[in-house]
């Protein structure tokens, strides 16, 4: 759903110019220095990019899902590290509060997340609990009017920058599956929290992940999201349903950029006395990529519109995430191939994209988890 086409076009144009003029020129610097320049972060704040999805009454722009993915198509066209910094505030680092938080929790944190004053981060994954999220071992044991949290969270995006964590922890240790899990909003300077060293990743330099360790970390009882125990797993799943659509859009944006780079290279690069774009084997790679990007974009928009209509889009969200991220991987591979030897050389940037986008098929649920969700829902529907 687009609330006002002119306003959306204006925001999209602003972001497109920001990506083209400010972010793309800094991609190499970010990869070399493994951080974002401070002035870029300030500009992101000024543009309101940290609060795109946060409801207007809490200081954000309150974009709809269709508007969000439209903007993510643009933000996806540059190094994922830029989008990653604002990504958690607009997605998994705030959605738990937006979807299930109490009014007091929303009032307390959402305005600061929307302005970019603090960064939000989502703590679900653990050393022994990745795809099987319901098996998580971190505990939050009630003690008077507090909870005591113990456990380790792993690969937590933006944890080194975070001011506040959404933490999934087991409040009922007797219940070993999803029903024993609750979600908490925890400030990062709470005593008992330490961070591991920043992970060395395959790509996405400038976007940081690390362990978050809770050692007898005492939080007030009102840190329990929504004030209800035992529904934290469902909160996490709802957060991910939305997050997966965003990642699908970002992957589509990245594929668009890589195809654009490959097309320009193919038109300029001459072999056998003519641009390689004249060769049909190159054309096949360009055409397949174009069609697949179009398909992904259509899926993402369709699923987003359905979500805006209030429909259950668990299946569609997983379909879009699976297709768009796998498509993005194929386009990355073809883009390197079209660049030939240059595709393997850092100066051309395409090898960096190839490594950066590999993560899209893994986080917020691997492709195999999306397949399981889609197939399970199909089987459930036919059995009912
Ligand atoms: N929205 C709301 N509720 C949901 C839901 C959703 N999208 N998905 C599941 N639930 C509910 C179920 O209805 C069920 O509720 P009841 O107990 O009341 O029946 C409960 O949650 C448990 O669901 P389910 O039985 O499907 O859980 P499983 O343990 O079988 O696992 C998967 C579900 C595999 C889909 C889940 O663990 C998952 O998504 N894993 C990937 C985790 C992930 O993406 N990690 C990335 C890290 S964050 S960057």
Image (tube, grey):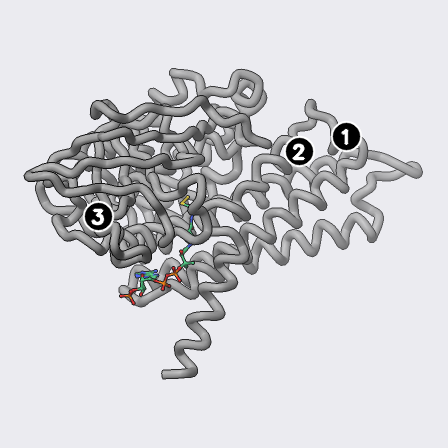
Q: Is residue 116 left or right of residue 356?
A: left
Asked whether the viewer can see residue 66, the reply is no
Residue 245 placed where, x, y %? 42, 53
Quarter of image, res 378: bottom left
**Residue pushed farthest left?**
144
Image point (48%, 45%), residue name? 363
Query: What secondary structure is found at the residue carrying circle 2?
Result: helix
Q: Nearer the viewer, residue 23 or 274?
A: 23
* Marks 2 & 1, CB-CB < 8 Å contact: yes
Query: What secondary structure is found at the residue carrying circle 3?
Result: loop
Q: Is mark 3 within 8 Å of ligand 1?
A: no
- Look at the picture and state if 83 lies above or below 231: above
Q: Is residue 19 left or right of residue 32?
A: left
Q: Nearer the viewer, residue 301 or 310?
A: 310
Q: Which residue is mark 2?
A: 350
Quarter of image, res 381: bottom left
Q: Which quarter of the rendered picture does the N terminus lie within?
A: bottom left
Q: Which residue is mark 1?
A: 342
Q: Which residue is mark 3?
A: 171
Q: Nearer the viewer, residue 156 or 148?
A: 148
* Marks 3 & 1, CB-CB < 8 Å contact: no
Asked whether the viewer can see residue 172, the reply is yes
Query: What secondary structure is found at the residue carrying circle 1?
Result: helix
Residue 340 placed where, x, y %? 80, 36
Residue 87 placed where, x, y %? 38, 37
Image point (85%, 35%), residue name? 270
**How far separated are the C-alphas under marks 2 and 1?**
9 Å
- Look at the picture and state if 160 lies above or below 243: above
**How far separated are the C-alphas under marks 3 and 1?**
53 Å
**How far separated are the C-alphas under marks 3 and 2?**
46 Å
Residue 330 placed where, x, y %? 66, 50
On the rendering, which quadrant does ligand 1 occupy?
bottom left
């Amino acid at each position: 759903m687009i609330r006002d086409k002119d306003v959306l076009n204006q925001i999209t144009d602003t972001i497109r110019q920001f990506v083209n003029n400010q972010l793309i020129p800094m991609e190499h610097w970010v990869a070399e220095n493994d951080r974002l320049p401070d002035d870029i972060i300030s500009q992101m704040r000024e543009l309101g990019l940290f609060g795109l999805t946060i409801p207007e009454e809490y200081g954000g722009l309150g974009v709809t899902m269709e508007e969000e993915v439209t903007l993510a198509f643009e933000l996806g066209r540059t190094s994922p590290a830029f989008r990653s910094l604002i990504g958690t505030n607009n997605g998994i680092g705030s959605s738990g509060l937006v979807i299930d938080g109490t009014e007091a929790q929303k009032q307390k944190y959402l305005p600061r997340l929307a302005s970019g004053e603090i960064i939000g981060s989502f703590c679900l994954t653990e050393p022994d609990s990745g795809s099987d999220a319901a098996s998580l071992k971190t505990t939050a044991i009630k003690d008077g009017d507090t909870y005591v949290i113990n456990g380790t969270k792993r690969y937590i995006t933006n944890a080194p920058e975070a001011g506040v964590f959404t933490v999934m922890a087991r409040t009922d240790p007797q219940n070993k599956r999803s029903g024993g899990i609750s979600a908490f909003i925890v400030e990062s300077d709470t005593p008992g929290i330490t961070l591991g060293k920043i992970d060395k990743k395959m790509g996405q330099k400038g976007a940081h992940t690390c362990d978050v360790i809770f050692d007898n970390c005492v939080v007030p009882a009102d840190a329990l999201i929504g004030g209800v125990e035992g529904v934290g797993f469902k909160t996490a799943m709802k957060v991910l349903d939305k997050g997966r659509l965003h990642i699908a859009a970002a992957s589509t944006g990245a594929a668009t950029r890589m195809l654009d780079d490959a097309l320009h290279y193919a038109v300029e690069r001459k072999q056998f006395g003519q641009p390689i774009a004249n060769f049909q084997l190159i054309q096949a790679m360009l055409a397949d990529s174009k069609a697949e990007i179009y398909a992904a974009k259509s899926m993402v928009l369709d699923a987003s519109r359905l979500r805006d209509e209030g429909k259950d889009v668990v299946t569609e969200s997983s379909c879009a995430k699976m297709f768009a991220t796998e498509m993005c991987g194929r386009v990355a591979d073809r883009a390197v191939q079209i660049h030939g030897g240059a595709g393997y050389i850092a100066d051309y940037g395409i090898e960096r994209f190839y490594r950066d986008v590999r993560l899209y098929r893994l986080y917020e649920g691997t492709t195999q988890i999306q397949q399981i969700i889609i197939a399970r829902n199909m089987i459930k529907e036919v059995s009912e």
